[in-house]
Image (tube, rainbow, N blue to C red):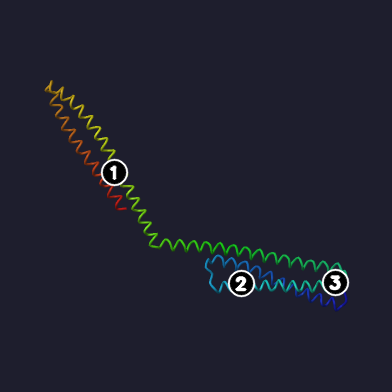
Amino acid sequence: MDVLQESGWEELRKEARKIEGDLDVKLSSYAKLGARFVDAGSPTLGSSRSWKSMEMEIQSLLEKLLDINDSMSRCAASAGPATSVTQKLARHRDILHEFTQEFRRIKGNISSMREHAELLSSVRDDISFWSGSPRMQLLRERAAIHGSISHIDDVISQAQATRAVLGSQRALFGDVQGKVKLLGDKFPVIRGLIGSIRRKRSRDTLILSAVIAACTLFLIIYWLSK
């Protein structure tokens, strides 16, 4: 390689190293800006322009570095075989390839994160719209009424079951009362004892009925007020 060719080679290498340094800084900033862009959820127009502007700058630097590598290849070819020149040229090509792959990787990740963020934002908007709509409020009121009716049905079922149990007990007591009365007719002392038992049983029945009625009424009022 003569002096003129060597001078041109060194100028090209100097320019290539400068662009490589710029690309290293730009790619790092591009990744950070893209992450902030996605985390914002709903980025402003200014931040979107900054992100796209940096993307275009990186793309332009990659194209310039590719052109310089082509010029270095032609310079090295005209100088004939030289191990040191070939190795340096191969290293610059590797750096260009690494930067290109890194740019594509970051760009793809940012695109995926943007689509995910936009999808989440759309879902949140849909939920917010439907939750505040008259139709949704009507459905909520309908569900609340349905729940109250179900609770009232449960209370009524329990009251009916209690009534059936009391009826069964009343029939049993009536049968026992008949037999005891028969004995009382034969024995006056037993008759007095039967009267006392009858008065006590009537009082207990009234108290039990009042308690059950009060509890049932309280449950109905409670579920209706919810």
Measured in 3D between alpha carbons, the distance from the residue under mark 2 to the one under mark 3, in whole angstroms, is 38 Å
Could you tell which of marks 2 and 3 lies nearer the N-terminus?
A: 2
Residue type for callout 1:
Ile
> What x and y, as percent, mark residue 149?
32, 49
| Residue placed under numbered mark 3 in the picture | 77
In the rendered image, the residue lying farthest to the bottom is 4
| Residue at x 82%, y 66% (from the top left corner) | 87
The residue tagged with tag 1: helix, strand or loop? helix
| Residue at x 65%, y 68% (from the top left corner) | 28
Measured in 3D between alpha carbons, the distance from the residue under mark 3 to the one under mark 1, in whole angstroms, is 99 Å
> What x and y, as percent, mark residue 79?
87, 73
In the rendered image, the residue lying farthest to the top is 186
Q: Do tag 1 and tag 2 residues touch (Cβ < 8 Å)?
A: no
Q: Quadrant of the N terminus?
A: bottom right
Could you tell which of marks 1 and 2 lies nearer the N-terminus?
A: 2
Q: Nearer the viewer, residue 30 or 77?
A: 77
| Residue 106 placement: quadrant | bottom right
| Residue placed under numbered mark 2 in the picture | 52
* 47 in relation to 130, above or below: below
In the image, 225: left or right of 204? Answer: right
Measured in 3D between alpha carbons, the distance from the residue under mark 1 to the one under mark 2, in whole angstroms, is 68 Å
Could you tell which of marks 3 and 1 lies nearer the N-terminus?
A: 3
In the rendered image, the residue lying farthest to the left is 188
> What x and y, as percent, mark residue 86?
83, 68
In the image, 148: left or right of 206? Answer: right
* 79 in relation to 190, above or below: below
Residue type for callout 2:
Lys
Q: Nearer the viewer, residue 221 or 200?
A: 221
Residue type for callout 3:
Ala
The residue tagged with tag 2: helix, strand or loop? helix
| Residue placed under numbered mark 1 in the picture | 156
Local crowd at mark 3 within 10 Å, few (<14), some, or many (≥20)? some
